[in-house]
Amino acid sequence: MAYDEGLAEQVRQLLASQPLVTERKMFGGLAFMHAGNMFCGMLKDDLMVRVGPQSYEEALAKPHVRPMDFTGRAMKGMVYVGPEGWRSAADLEKWVQVGLEFARSLPPKQGYAGQSKHC
């Protein structure tokens, strides 16, 4: 399994009423996008969250959070949240909202047409 399908379903439910949100398989896992900008996803049992460069250090200081480094090099502004950090519904919702809020601050990706599968 490339990603935790139970986690994916929980995220889908949290995002069901959000406009401009799509999902796409990427990075060997699943990514959720807002207007073409990735904001969260999952790889194995980790939640990936795009917190942005301004909130990166603050996010890393939280329990169960580490740099997103699937290529061996950390991606500034992106973090992995281990299962202990998203187990409760409230914690999962908080992390998804952090990513979504950051993505909303970005302009839509050039050529974004929302063709991917909607949540």
Image (cartoon, grey):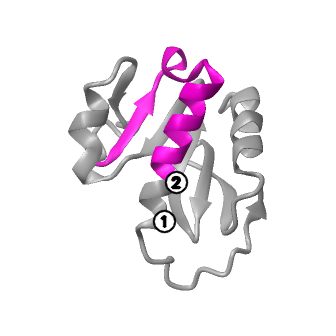
**Which segment is the magenta one?**
76-99
Of 68 and 62, the residue lying toward us: 62
Mark 2 sits on what residue?
100
Of 73 and 77, the residue lying toward us: 77
SS of the residue under disc 2: helix
Residue 81, magenta (yes or no): yes
- Label 2 crowd bin: few (<14), some (14–19), many (20+), radius 10 Å: many
The answer to whether residue 97 is left or right of residue 29 is: left
Give x and y (percent) for residue 39. Answer: 50, 53
The mark found on residue 104 in the picture is: 1
Q: Residue at x 77, y 36 (%)?
A: 9
Q: Is residue 7 above or below residue 52?
A: above
Q: Amino acid at mark 1?
A: Arg
SS of the residue under disc 1: helix
The mark found on residue 41 in the picture is: none
Q: Residue at x 74, y 74 (%)?
A: 115
